[in-house]
Amino acid sequence: MELIESARSLFNDLNFSYVSQWKRQNPSRRVIGYLPIYIPREIFYAHGMLPVGLFGAGDRIPVVKGDAYFQSYICHIPRTVIEMALNGNLDAFDGFIFPAICDVIRNLSGIFQLKFKNKLIRYLDFPQNFDPEVGGVFYRQALEELSADLTAMNGVKLSTESLNRTIKLYNENRRLLRELGDFRAEYPHKLSAVEHYLILRAGQTITVEEHNDMLKQLLPQLAARDVVQEDKIRVVVSGSFCEQPPLGLIRTIENAGCYIVEDDFQLGPLWINDAIPDNTSDPLGALVEAYLTKSTHSSAVYDGDSPKEEQLVAQVRKRKADGVIFCAPSFCDPALLDRPLLEKAMDRSHIRHISFQYHENLGQFHVVREQAGTFADMIKLWD
């Protein structure tokens, strides 16, 4: 389909041609790159800036310079991000935001501060205390400081009207993405996991208006697809929230007999799980409250009164999945430290599961194919 191929082209373009073209249309425009998982994109767009996700380069570029900056016993994504930056792939970007995920991303922000002193480099801390009088105050102050930095870049001040408008646009985007996710879960044979992944990635490169238009066109086209449903089990994939799996790995899981009906490959676009008020006198406060009360679960965030184990079980039940595949990047401390707790929760709830690790430039998938295929056969034979 033309829309999906357009999304694939955006995914394959490591030079970010779309970003350069968007920026040339108006000299006041600025482009801000951000690392996974989540940032409040509404603020950047209200400042007249395009927030663009940076998810590494997978196996599409050789890592030569990046290995000089990081140890061999950490995850792979920072290597390709710094490799792209040093090679000039990110020259069109005016700044970079590093959200609080782990120490590796914090260290990557420090390297960018040293190497790119003419660009805006910020490490964005998120609260782990969800008390409005503690975490809420802290987060609001962080966003106000960020907004002041953005104003200094292009002279655009954050207004109530502009922020309400962008919140409304991103509310619509989240609504359409949830509709797409529900469609994928109900008709996984009509929308493959790779196609779903590419559509979400496109939304983190192009403007929110263009992505909304894409989704509105795509949904009826998918519904009209005439595809035969295969004899596959339904699985939830969990654990790969930051470093991205190769497309070949996602495709291998499905080809091995598993329909992926839910995953956490890209949490950012749907991090806020409900609409944010878009007609208030304090839209910044609405963004703060949404983060405190409407965030999804992730290994990078303290779970408070809502344990991740319970949320994953509820997710499996909602999607009527037959099992869970724990799929995390090698050396990802947050995901791998949470895995034993999540596996025990699956055992208590009698939910079958398997687990393996990967890295973004993994090129051989036969082990994954054997594990996923055996898992699917076991469920089909014994259930």
Image: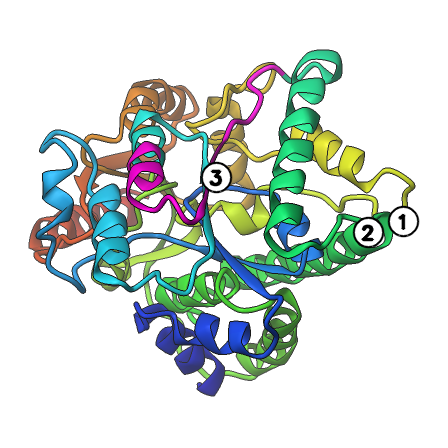
Q: Earlier in the sequence, mark 3 or mark 2?
A: 2
List x then y, in percent, for residue 225.
Answer: 50, 83
Was residue 123 drawn as part of the magenta stretch in this picture? yes
Label 2 CA crowd tier, 10 Å (few <14, some 14–19, many 20+)? many
Is residue 316 placed above or below 335 in the rendered structure? below
Gap between marks 3 and 1, in whole Å? 35 Å
**Image quadrant occupied by the N terminus:** bottom left
**Image quadrant occupied by the C terminus:** top left
Front-most of residues 234 and 165 = 165
Label 1 CA crowd tier, 10 Å (few <14, some 14–19, many 20+)? some
What residue is shown with label 1? 279
In terms of secondary structure, where does tag 1 sit? loop
List x then y, in percent, for residue 283.
Answer: 81, 41
Contact between labelled residues 1 and 3, with CB atoms less than 8 Å apart: no
In terms of secondary structure, where does tag 3 sit? helix
Give the amino acid type for the residue marked by disc 3 in the picture.
Val
What residue is shown with label 3? 316
Q: Residue at x 19, y 30 (%)?
A: 331
Gap between marks 3 and 2, in whole Å? 34 Å
The reply to whether residue 376 is in sight is: no
Residues in magenta, as a range? 110-129
Label 3 CA crowd tier, 10 Å (few <14, some 14–19, many 20+)? many
Q: Residue at x 90, y 43 (%)?
A: 280
Front-most of residues 101 and 194 = 101
What residue is shown with label 2? 164
